[in-house]
Amino acid sequence: MELERFELGATHYKESDLKEGKLLSLPWTPNLKYAWDNGVAIGRYLAELKEGRIIARKCNKCRRIMLPPRMFCEMCWRPTDEWVYVKDTGRVNTYSVCYVNWDASRIKKGEKPHLPAVIEIDGASPGMGILHLLGEVEPEDIKIGMWVRAVWKKPEEREGAITDILYFKPVRR
Ligand SMILES: [Zn+2]
């Protein structure tokens, strides 16, 4: 029913309209409400982030400590066995210097680029880590393998999300 309204209300553009940069518009404002379940592993992971801790899951057969945690080991084809706290430090596995925003718009002139990176977290198995942002560092100073530490939001501002970590900043070792 909603889909039908969507189709009836849609504006159809000609090829020339698209070339001129006209975007699809709808005369209807959707009222979208939804709920989801994070599942056991990610639910606990997010709850621990709210407390300023990072938790992983261990498989006692292959001995891997997996992050983000999961309840099933895809290598051993069996359930994982225990929760393991890992540190909030790690090393840069890979990174990017990004001049576009999440919506693909270009960042404003003079604004610093986003620095997404994969951080291999201390205490988790090699290759296990978090996709996050780097901060307090200039792009030209980032090195693969450099040590970093999580910079957390204040406890009262955390909400049980990966953004409870603001970014990872370089640390000396
Ligand atoms: Zn395993």
Image (cartoon, rainbow, N blue to C red):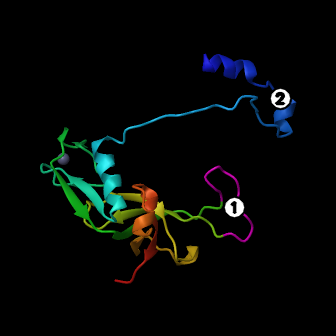
Magenta span dominant secondary structure: loop
Q: Give the number of the disc on residue 107.
A: 1
- Quadrant for the N terminus, please: top right
Q: Position of residue 106 (x, y in %)?
A: 71, 57
Q: Which residues are magenta?
A: 100-111
Residue at horizontal 26%, vertical 64%?
A: 86
Mark closest to the chain's N terminus, 1 or 2: 2
Considering every residue shown, the one lying at the far left of the view is: 61
List the residue tagged with mark 2.
15
Q: Give the number of the disc on residue 47.
A: none
Regarding residue 68, the answer to whether it shows in the image is no
Regarding residue 28, the answer to whether it shows in the image is yes
Q: Nearer the viewer, residue 49 or 167?
A: 49
Tell me whether the residue at label 1 lies in contact with that at label 2, contact meaning CB atoms closer than 8 angstroms: no
Q: Three-letter amino acid code at disc 1?
A: Ile
Give yes or no for residue 150 being in the magenta stretch: no
Q: Nearer the viewer, residue 84 or 120?
A: 84
**Which secondary structure, mark 2?**
helix
Q: Position of residue 159 (x, y in %)?
A: 42, 57
Q: Position of residue 152 (x, y in %)?
A: 42, 69
Residue at horizontal 61%, vertical 52%?
A: 102
Q: Is residue 5 above or below residue 37?
A: above
Residue 35 location, quadrant: top left
Residue 12 location, quadrant: top right
**Which secondary structure, mark 1?**
loop
Considering every residue shown, the one lying at the far front of the view is: 156
Q: For marks 1 and 2, give the one nearer the viewer.
A: 1
Q: Three-letter amino acid code at disc 2?
A: Glu
Q: CA distance from mark 1 to mark 2?
A: 29 Å
Q: Position of residue 78 (x, y in %)?
A: 17, 39
Residue at horizontal 34%, vertical 83%?
A: 173
Give yes or no for residue 106 being in the magenta stretch: yes
